Image (spheres, rainbow, N blue to C red):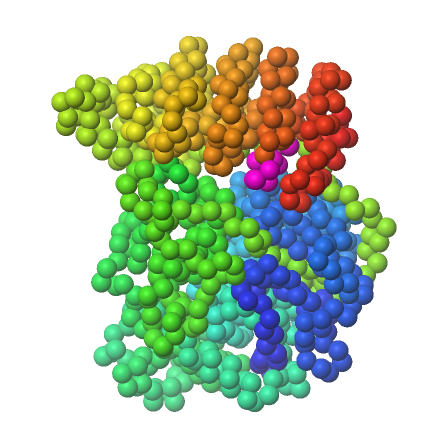
Amino acid sequence: MPFKLAASLAAHSADVRAVASPTDTLILSASRDSTAISWAKPSDASFSPAAIFTAGYAVTGGQDAIINVWTLGSPASDPTYSLLGHLDNVCSLHAKPDGTIISGSWDKTAKIWQGFQLQHDLTGHTQSVWTVTATEGEEYLTGSADKTIKLWRQNKCLRTYHGHKDAVRSLATLTDVGFASASNDSEIIIWTFEGDVVHSLSAHTSFVYSLSILPSGDIVSGGEDRTVRVWRDGECAQTIVHPAISVWAVSSMPNGDIVTGASDGVVRVFSEAEERWASPEELKAFDDQVASQALPSQQVGDVNKSDLSGIEALANPGKFRSKPDEVKMVRNGAIVEAHQWDAAAGRWMKIGEVVDAVGSGRRQLHEGKEYDYVFDVDIQDGVPPLKLPYNANENPYAAAQRFLERNELPMTYIDQVVQFIEKNTAGVKLGGSDEFVDPYTGASRYRSAGAPAQAAASSYSDPYTGSSRYVSTAPTTPLASAVASSDPFTGAGRYVPGGVASKAVSKAPAVIPVYKTVPFKQANVNAMQGKLYQFDQALRSEISTSALAMYPDEVGQLEEAFSFLSQSITGGRPSASLTPAHIETVVNILDRWPASQRFPVLDLARLLSGFCSDLIESAGYRTNFFEALYKASELNNDGSPSTKAKETNILLALRTIVNAFQEKTKLGDGAWAKKILVVLDDAPYDAYTKAQRVALSTVLFNLSCIALQERVEPSLRSLHVRFLEKVLRTERGDPEVVYRALVGLGNVLYAAKSQGYPLDATQLNSIKDCITPLPSAVTDARITGVVGEIFALI
């Protein structure tokens, strides 16, 4: 029998990003609306939001980098346990029947938690870890945006699997075979654990987000092409089209039913058992909803209406009957319809009406590719505008994610970027009379939960162009990523059975020490270069300023510097190295250009500090470089009035200093680092803007990371500790500033203890006095745990 709709569960207000179905009467779902819901089905009743199970836990993770563990059957506003350790969005969770939890994160790591405490860090992937799963014993699989899959035993990598051409998004183990993997390359690969490819399953036409294994051994997949597909013996046995942009998640019930979570916010159950099918009216309503979708012609191929057969062609199955996922387009009057062959049901199913590509007459080129839109986006003051390419048939979240990853920006911006896309494409309609029509499917509004979309224009004037553009701010709403743990019946889903670790102590895993520094290396080099040359031309065109313009040899040096940085940022190998002469050129231009026109040169200095730190550390150049930086930004002159130009210059100077403290940096006698702290400490803390304070706390944090590797000169360490205390005693408005400074202080204390190099009693008492009020004064779940760790180090 074919799978047909059994139930539609609507309560979420945004995309359902994860589902789990540990029993036939319990479904767990997590959504971009920041909620997780437990759906219960008492006996033969319908599923409804409830919590009737008193055994086990549900596990959720999100953008706040915290993993929360909730006791099923005990609704509460606070989780039973919170697991701290990841540094970025937790995007994947899985658990074993013994309660072991495996998590994956955008921080490029996976972590193993036992007894709700951190047991192992799995480090080795070079990009986000999108998917994790357990195999047997203490072995685990992880899949990453770096296109690889890794097999681990405890925290040791046993094997790396290469084969996918894009990010790996889902993993599922297969009894007696090995495992299956799904990817953004639209392929599903079946592997043996030895690394042999058994099958490559090709039918999806876009990203494949989720896999699950049915009790029968069949594979279920969901993806960006609106479909769920059932795979049997290496072939696609059935395609279930959804009235949504994306099918984010699939899960299998012990009884063989399929649970899906989609971008329209609905959880759906599909069943092969006729007695569990929805009513004929509900089935027809679902089919009508799917059929009413509008499909951009890019999704199904170019359309020439004059070459299409009429609707009568559907009466002749022909060769299409052998291809369950085949799409056939026919002309029904003036309308072009797309129909897909449903082999299981033995009929053609209308999946939408095909419309012309949006903006086909005004497509724009970006890096050699055509897009409907190419937006300029300003993320922060003083940073060059970044290019955001977008096609109207894309999922806005996929475009936003690509944009943030490419520009090395925090994923906390993703909802704001999506809102910006939606706001600036809101006039695009593909049919229908709704105020807003989803540019991918023609369905109703596709919007993330939270604040209304921001307008493209703001009061902020872009320093590179002078125009008003979008300025993103970090959202506060966490993104629910995964819920519940491993299904004890099939291994699918994410359910923790009752009785697991019932005596575990609720203790957060250690955060300190943190060895990895935080850089500011993202940039739009072309925009930076263009603005710098624009300013140079303006200086050159006026007699009074012509002497300040760049000399021919300086222009050549900057050309080489920009070429080097462009290749470095994109991960390429620069064709030629830079020399001290390139640093000297930047120093000279900073020294003579007017304050209002220095910011592109300061931004260039920021990148040189990040990518050419060895060169700047050369004898004599570090001192000159930073002295020029202090002077150009007026960091060492707090008596001048504050202007927008000065604020921007100071921010860029602070980020340049942040990049000077990297893991490989050597402090030596510490004189240069001490001078930096003295200069930064001279300005009243309240004089720094919010963005500047984040950069300032990052300077102090990065210096603490170096202190873990190198014994710091005593006077430098004392100055560092006093500065950290100053931030922690003063800052109350931005939890991120407090957190970075607090972890930095913890690193210093950890280094002092591990190096046998203790602080004196006066310093320790002052630290105690400083951090004691923080848990109650700063609203951030991370603060309490780190404060506790610091007290343990004192």
Is any atom of residue 646 visible in this view?
A: yes
Residue lying farthest to the right in this orientation = 503
Q: Which image quadrant is residue 268 in?
A: bottom right
Is any atom of residue 210 visible in this view?
A: no
Q: On the rendered image, what quadrant is the C terminus found in?
A: top right
Residue at 27% x, 51% y: name it: 365
Q: Which image quadrant is residue 732 in?
A: top right
User: Residue 460, relative to residue 583: is it above or below?
Assistant: below
Q: On the rendered image, what quadrant is the N terminus found in?
A: bottom right
User: Residue 56, relative to residue 336: is it above or below?
Assistant: above
* Residue bounds of the magenta highlight: 732-743
Q: Position of residue 625 (x, y in %)?
A: 40, 17
Q: Is residue 215 left or right of residue 523?
A: right
Q: Is residue 146 left or right of residue 779?
A: left
Nearer the observer, 286 or 597: 597
* Number of numbered discs visible in the structure rendering: 0
Residue at 71% x, 19% y: name it: 763
- The answer to whether residue 189 is magenta is no
Residue at 60% x, 88% y: name it: 279
Nearer the observer, 478 or 213: 478
Q: Position of residue 122 (x, y in %)?
A: 65, 41
Q: Position of residue 777 (x, y in %)?
A: 66, 40
- The answer to whether residue 733 is magenta is yes
Nearer the observer, 337 or 588: 588
Residue at 66% x, 24% y: name it: 748
- Chief SS of the magenta region: helix
User: Residue 668, relative to residue 681: is it above or below?
Assistant: above
Q: Position of residue 338 (x, y in %)?
A: 38, 77
Q: Is residue 787 left or right of residue 12?
A: right
